[in-house]
Image (spheres, helix red, strand yellow):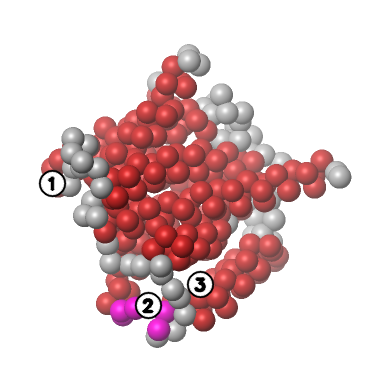
Amino acid sequence: MSAERRARLLMFGALVLLGAGWGLGVPFNKIAVTAGHRDFGIIFWQAMVAAGLLLPWMLTRGGLPLHRRALALYAFVAVAGTLVPNFASFSAQRYLPSGVSALVLSFIPMVALPIAVLMRTDHASPGRLLGLVAGAVGVALIVLPGDALPDRSMVPWVLVALIGTVFYAIEGNGIARFGTAGLSPVQLVAGAVLLTALVAGPLALARGVFISPLRVWGQGDWAVLAGGVLNVGSYVGYLWLVGRAGAVFAAQVSYLVTGFGVFWSMVLLGERFSPWFWAAGAVIFLGLALVQPRPAPVPGAAGEALR
């Protein structure tokens, strides 16, 4: 097997693993909001979980870089990759089925490609465009039919959830274009989640949505904890994949998050979907197969070794 083929298999394997883990977080977040937890309250504790897992590791490796460019990157990832998209997602998940929330993430590549072309971090070959078109057609098969949503009043909340996809696409392309100033994915995520917690904590208190841990834990509290663990693992992997295969290919993880998110929603929440959904799934995975990773990593990007 050639080195290029092994690299491609590694990229696709990483994509599937990320999709499975991130997809599992979708029903966990639905459980959390159904239990009464809200936006910045969830964001704060999931950031604290991530910080608790990553910062001790950083301390054994010389600490967290705090030079000016590192601080700017932490702020960029915190805002574009967590605070804004998660606020939108958690707000929308109060009203949307978990499977629909997973579906919305499929729009990320539709936004990521034109941004990548404008920033000259990727190219729009005919095959890749065809793959993205196939993904868009698959999404349309779910969104457009009248029975796709249990209630048409949910449509505005789908639009709110889409805000998150725009910021995820901006984040991925920003990292691919400007690199990470020598930071590894673990360092970048550790700095970002620490800053996220510092911002989300006061906002949660101000909005009256802070989650006190000093009580008997219910299902929603454990869901917040599990979602935090899954999110940090998937996020580190995502940043690694951006550096190895580019922002547009890494954004294809949204298709797998959709598939696994729907699967886990059916298993854990008992959700069921119309035949339109299953027809769309075949088209979406066709689009995934048409979008190939680049063989070379982005210089200086997040594909550096996990230190």
Q: Tell me where residue 108 appears, x and y as whole percent.
A: 49, 59
Neighbor class of circle 2 (other Cα within 10 Å; few <14, some 14-19, many 20+) is some
Number of the label disc, if any, that sits on residue 208: 1
- Residue 150 location, quadrant: bottom left
Q: Is residue 280 above or below residue 250?
A: below
Q: Which one is in front, 226 or 236? A: 226
Q: Nearer the viewer, mark 3 or mark 1?
A: 1
Image quarter where the N terminus lies is top right
Q: Is residue 303 above or below residue 132?
A: above
Residue 145 at least partly seen: yes
Estimate the spatial distance between the alpha carbons at disc 3 and disc 2, rounded to whole Å: 13 Å
- The residue segment tinted magenta is 147-152
Q: Which one is in front, 157 or 131? A: 157
Number of the label disc, if any, that sits on residue 149: 2
Q: Which one is in front, 256 or 8? A: 256
Q: Main secondary structure of the magenta part?
A: loop
Residue drawn at x 29%, y 50% is: 219
Residue drawn at x 29%, y 39% is: 45
Return the residue at label 3: 139
Q: Tell me where residue 175 appears, x and y as whole percent.
A: 51, 41
Estimate the spatial distance between the alpha carbons at disc 3 and disc 1, rounded to whole Å: 36 Å
Image quarter where the C terminus lies is top right
